[in-house]
C-alpha cells in the first residue's frame, strides 16, 4: 500500500504516522466497541473538516500549474462536495444527526488547527506545499480503510470502514498519488529528495500528520 | 436582460460598459467582416483567459461562505474546464489551430492585465470582491450573445454568437446572478448600495469592464 | 478600557472573553505562584506565535485599502519584529532560554490552531476579517496588562505585566483601535452592526478569543 | 553590475531585458529631451505602481520562510512606503503635481498588468515566485540608474537618475540580491538551475520584464 513514490518517503519523515493511523479510536471502531456518541462527535467534526478540505482543493485549482492539475483538483472538490459530503450527511442521518445539527456544530480546536494549517500552508506556499498538507488525510484514510477492511471487523461501523477501504476511495488515493508524483517531478525533477525544499515539504506533511492524530476523539 | 438585481446597478457604475459590449470587434463579428486571423488571435488569447478564469472560480471555492456558494463556484470551474474550454479547443481545431498552439500562445498585455486583476481582487479582497471582478465577463458575454443572436448575423461566426446567446449560457448567467444577489444580501443586507463597500465593489466591476473592453483585438 | 468603538461591541459577542482574559494562568502570574517552567513553555510558544502574528500583519499590508492602512500595518510588523520579538528574546535569555531553543521549539496544537486561524481568516476574507481575527490578541493583552498593573502583583513576572500594562503597549492598543474603527467606518458606515457581515466579523473575533483562551498553558 | 548570482542568470532568460532597460524613454530622460508632460504621466503611474509594490513586499512578509526573510521584506515595505513614496511625492510636488492628483490618477492598463501580475505570482506561488516577479523592477532600475549616472546626463531629470544611480538605491539592490541568492540556495540548493522550477521562475522574471518594458510611456 504505497500509493506512488512521494507518499512513502514523506510518511517516513512523519514521526506521528502510527499515532495517526493506528490510534485507539480505530481499533475501537474495528471491534465495534467505540461508543456511538464518540463516533457521532467525530462525524460532526469531520463534516466541518470536509468543508474546509474542499476549500483547500478549490485553492488547489487556483494554484495549479497546468490544466491537468487544475482538472485533478476540481475533481477532488467534486468528489468531496458532491459524493463524500453527501454520504456523510446520509451516514449522520441514519445515526439520527440531521444536517442542520452538523452545520450548527462548533468546530473544536483540533478541527480548527488541522484545517487552518492546511489553508495557510496552501495560501502561504505554492502548489506542492498545499499537496503536502493535504496528503496525510487522503493517504492515511486510504491505509486505514484498506487495513481494517482486510481484517475482521464488527458490523457497527462497517459502512465507514468499507467506504475508505472500498475500490472507489482506493482509486481516489491512486489518482492523488499520480497527481502528487507528477507535480513533484515537474517541479523538483527526478531526485526531489536532493532539493532543500523537500525537507520543508516533509515537515509540512509531518505537522499535518500530527494534527490528524489529534483529530480523533479521545477515548474514555 | 438584467440578470438579477446587483448586476444592473454595477453596470450603471461602469463608464466603459458600452465600449466593452458594443465594441467594433463585435459589429464585425456579427456582420461577418471580422478577419479570420483577428478572430483566431482573439480565440488564442481567450483560451489563456479561460484558464485563469477557472483558477479564479477555484479561488471562489476557497473564499465562499457556505456549502451552497462553494458548490456554485465548483460548478463554474466544471462548466469552464470541462465544457467551455473543450468547446473552445473544438472551435479552434475547426479553425485550424491545434491545442498545442493555444497552450504555446504568449499572453498579451491585455490578457495579463484582466486575468491578474481578477486574481488579485479575489486574493486581496473577500468573496464579493472576487465576484465583482468576475461579473463583467459573465454578464457582458451574456448581453452580447443575446443581443447579437436576436438580430441578423452572418454565418461566419454564428457558432460563437449562438454559444453565448444560447439557452445554456443564458442559464449560466441567471445562475451567476442568483449566486451574486444572494451573496450580496447575505453580506450587505437588503439595501447594499447604502453600505460604503458598495462603491469599492462598483469600482472593481468598472475596472474589470475597462479591461474587458481592452481585451478585444483592435481592428484595422 | 474600551479601546475605541468596535472592540467593545465585538467583545460582547465573544462568549469566552473572560475565560481568556481572566484565566487561572493570569492570576498565578500576578501573585507569582506560576511555576517558572510553565512560564517558559508559554514564552517559547509565544515566540512562535509572534512570528505568525507578524506574518499576518504583513498580509494586512497586502490587503489594506489605502496608504494609511498600509502604513499602520507596516508599523505593526515593525513593532512586532523589531521591538516585541527582541524583548521576548531578552526575557527568554534572562530566563535561561537561548533564541536557538525558541526557534527549535515545536509549535503545540494551541499555537497552530490560533495562528493558522488568523492567517486563513485573512487570506480567505478581506481586510476586516483579518483585523477581527487579530483584535482579541492585541486588545486582550492590553486589558490584562492594564488590569494587572493597576492592582498588586508579585515581582516574579513584573516585567511581563509592565510590558503589556505600560504606556507603550497601551498606545499601540489605541492606535490599533483607531485603525480598526476607521477601517470599519470606511467599509460598513456609521451603523456597522446593521450590516449582516458584522455578525461574521463578530464570529471571527469570538473564535479567535476562544483560541486565545486555549493558548494559556494549563495549570497543574 | 551583476547584483549577486541569481539575477544575472534570470536576466539572460528575459528576451525583453534590453527593451526594458534601454527603452527610448530612458535615452530621452538622460539627454533631457523627454517632454515634461510625459515624465509627469510616468510619475503618476509610478506612484500607483509603488503602492502595489509595497503591498507585494507586505505579502512577502507573510510568505517568508524565516525571521530574517521577514525582516528583509519588512525593510522593503518601509523603504518604499516611508522613503521612496515620500521622495516621489516631493518630486511630483516640485513638478506641480499635488499628492491628491497622484491618488486620483486612474491606473493605466500597463500599470494594472504589471502590478497585478506581481500580486498573483506571489499569492498563487511561493516566496521565490514572488521574488522572481519583483526582481526585474528592483534590479532593472538599479542597472539603469547606475548606467545613466556613469555617463553624461542633462540636468532636467538628474534627481531621478541620481536617486536610482546613487549609493542608497544601489545598496538596496545589493541587499535584495543577498536576500534572493540566500532564498534560492535555502530552497533549491547550490545548483538551482538544475531544478525544473528554475525554468518557471525564469519565465515569471521574463514576463515581469516584458511588462516593465511596457510600463514606460510611449514617446511621440
Image (cartoon, coloured by chain):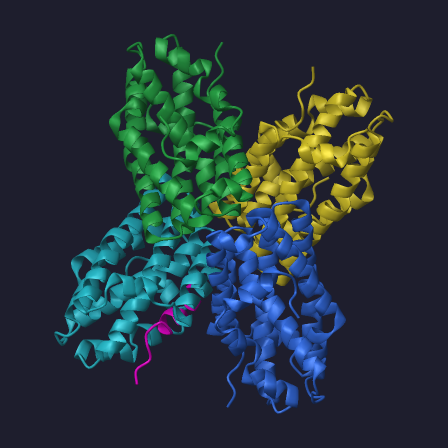
Chain colours: A cyan, B green, C blue, D yellow
Q: Is residue A175 left or right of residue D175?
A: left
* B141 vs A200, nearest the viewer: B141
* B58 vs B151, nearest the viewer: B151
* B67 vs C190, nearest the viewer: C190
Total numbered badges shown on the rendered structure = 0
Above or below: residue C201 compared with residue B193? below
Which residues lie in the magenta part? A205-220
* D125 vs C204, nearest the viewer: C204
Q: Residue at (19%, 69%) from the top-left corner?
A: A96
Above or below: residue D88 compared with residue A160? above
Q: Is residue B103 visible?
A: no
Q: Is residue A22 left or right of residue B23?
A: left
**Horizontal and vertical percent position of residue C208:** 50, 67
Q: Is residue D132 left or right of residue A92?
A: right
Q: Is residue D114 left or right of residue B176?
A: right
Q: Is residue A217 magenta?
A: yes
Above or below: residue A56 compared with residue B94? below
**Horizontal and vertical percent position of residue A43:** 27, 68
Q: Residue furthest right?
A: D155
Q: Is residue C141 visible?
A: yes
Amino acid at each position: 500500500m504505497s500509493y506512488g513514490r512521494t507518499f512513502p518517503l514523506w510518511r517516513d519523515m512523519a514521526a506521528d504516522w502510527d499515532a495517526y493511523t493506528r490510534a485507539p479510536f480505530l481499533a475501537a471502531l474495528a471491534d465495534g466497541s467505540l461508543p456511538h456518541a464518540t463516533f457521532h462527535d467525530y462525524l460532526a467534526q469531520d463534516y466541518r473538516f470536509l468543508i474546509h478540505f474542499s476549500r483547500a482543493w478549490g485553492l488547489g485549482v487556483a494554484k495549479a500549474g497546468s490544466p491537468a492539475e487544475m482538472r485533478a483538483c476540481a475533481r477532488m472538490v467534486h468528489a468531496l462536495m458532491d459524493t463524500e459530503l453527501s454520504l456523510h450527511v446520509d451516514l449522520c442521518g441514519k445515526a439520527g444527526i440531521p444536517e442542520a445539527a452538523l452545520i450548527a456544530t462548533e468546530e473544536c480546536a483540533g478541527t480548527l488547527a488541522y484545517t487552518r494549517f492546511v489553508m495557510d500552508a496552501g495560501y502561504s506556499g505554492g502548489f506542492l506545499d498545499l499537496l503536502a498538507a493535504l496528503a496525510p488525510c487522503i493517504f492515511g484514510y486510504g491505509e486505514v480503510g484498506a487495513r481494517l477492511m482486510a481484517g475482521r471487523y464488527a458490523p457497527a461501523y462497517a459502512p465507514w470502514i468499507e467506504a475508505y477501504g472500498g475500490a472507489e476511495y482506493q482509486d481516489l488515493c491512486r489518482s492523488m498519488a499520480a497527481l502528487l508524483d507528477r507535480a513533484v517531478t515537474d517541479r523538483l525533477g527526478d531526485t526531489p529528495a536532493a532539493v532543500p525544499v523537500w525537507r520543508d515539504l516533509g515537515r509540512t506533511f509531518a505537522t499535518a500528520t500530527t494534527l490528524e492524530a489529534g483529530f480523533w476523539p479521545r477515548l474514555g
